[in-house]
Image (cartoon, helix red, strand yellow):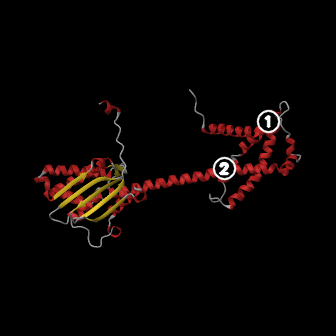
Amino acid sequence: MRLPLHPRLRLALAALAFWTTVGVVFALPRLSAADAPGAWRAALLASLVEWWSWGLIAPVVPWFDRRLPLPDAPSARRLAAHLGAGLVVTAAFLVLSTVFAALLGLGDWRRIVDGRLVVEAAQGMYLWELLVYGLIAGVWLSYRYYRRSVDAELALARMERNFADARLNALRMQLDPHFLFNALNTISAHVQAEPRQARQMIEHLGELLRRTLEPSYRQQVPLHEELDFLEHYLAIQRIRFGDRLVVELQVAPEARRALVPSLVLQPLVENAFRHGLAQRAAGGRVVIRASLRGVQLVVCVEDDGVGLPAGWTFAENAGIGLAVTRERVESRGPLGLGALAVRRGPNGGTEAEISLPFREAIPAQPEHGDALA
């Protein structure tokens, strides 16, 4: 059994392999020109000494950059700081590489104290090492800014998810209090005379509240699940209104598989009852239609109630439920393909229409046990 390597050891081995590869690549021209016996070995070791020394010095660059008391954005002050650090780091590299070469028998360490190292640096060697420092610093800064942009994108994605969750929670909390009070009053009135209907209303109300307040409810669900949830709300309203209420579902089979934002229909149907039918003693009719128009899913909630008041506009008169629903619908469709429109119905009353890009829900895979069953 292989023992796992410590992350720092893996990083050190990867760095050694990288700098060794660089050293070998830079040694190739020297190896091709080495004619004397054993010259290729000296040329290879000299190149490896140089780049291994840079491998030991390179971690100083990110260490120094992280401790600069400057904004992270590129600036002249940051570049000037790295230029000054480059002079110091390059001088340290020259000393380290000289000692390293002396230990391998490729040079004389006394070059450090007798001034020969300074003379060589003045002759142009220092400029090349400064360029290497600049390359290392440039790679580090590019990586750092890349990480910042990735972190910013992840933070934005988290904010968008949190915003979507907040909008869904706002809808979940928008279940009309008047509906709850009326449902409870209806239950109370039926307890003695119609206990069976009272129990049915309690069951539907409990399931409605359970799904509404469920913290793990998904952002998107198939339309058939949304209709199943809506059925609990409609069942309570049917018991309340009795024969005065007619609800029609006209849903195409292919539309039932479409993904829609969860809790998207309940605010529309609730508005049809509250603002359209509740003000009429005779009750009324609500029609819920869903069909495909090309690549679009169109869902319409229509009532024959009192209709929109004069001068009604979505921007000025829509409540929280409708406004949040419109935001969620529009966020589902790129380039304006997702839309919610509220207008007067063709035969009176009000019509709310949702248009969404059609996306088919992926059927849930059966569990292994279910497949065997």
In this rendered view, identify the residue nearer to me: 160 or 342: 342
Classify 85 as above or below 102: below
Q: Residue at x 46, y 56 (%)?
A: 159
Residue 364 picture location, percent across and down: 35, 40
SS state under label 1: helix
Q: Please tell me how crowded label 2 is: few (under 14), some (14-19), or many (20+) other residues with Cα within 10 Å.
A: few
Query: Which residue ends up furthest to the left in the rendered image?
Result: 193
Residue 92 picture location, percent across and down: 77, 47
- Residue 311 in which image quadrant: bottom left
In space, the residues marked 2 and 1 are separated at their CA atoms by 30 Å
Q: Please tell me how crowded label 1 is: few (under 14), some (14-19), or many (20+) other residues with Cα within 10 Å.
A: few
Q: Residue at x 32, y 63 (%)?
A: 341
Query: Which residue ends up furthest to the bottom in the rendered image?
Result: 311
**Residue at which label 1 appears:** 32
Residue 310 picture location, percent across and down: 27, 73
Q: Tell me how many marks there are.
A: 2
SS state under label 2: helix
Please give the label number shown on residue 139: 2
Classify 312 as above or below 288: below
Q: Amino acid under label 2?
A: Val
Which quadrant of the figure contains the C terminus? top left
Q: Amino acid under label 1?
A: Ser
Comparing labels 2 and 1, the label whose residue is closer to the camera: 1
Residue 32 as seen in the image, left or right of residue 338: right
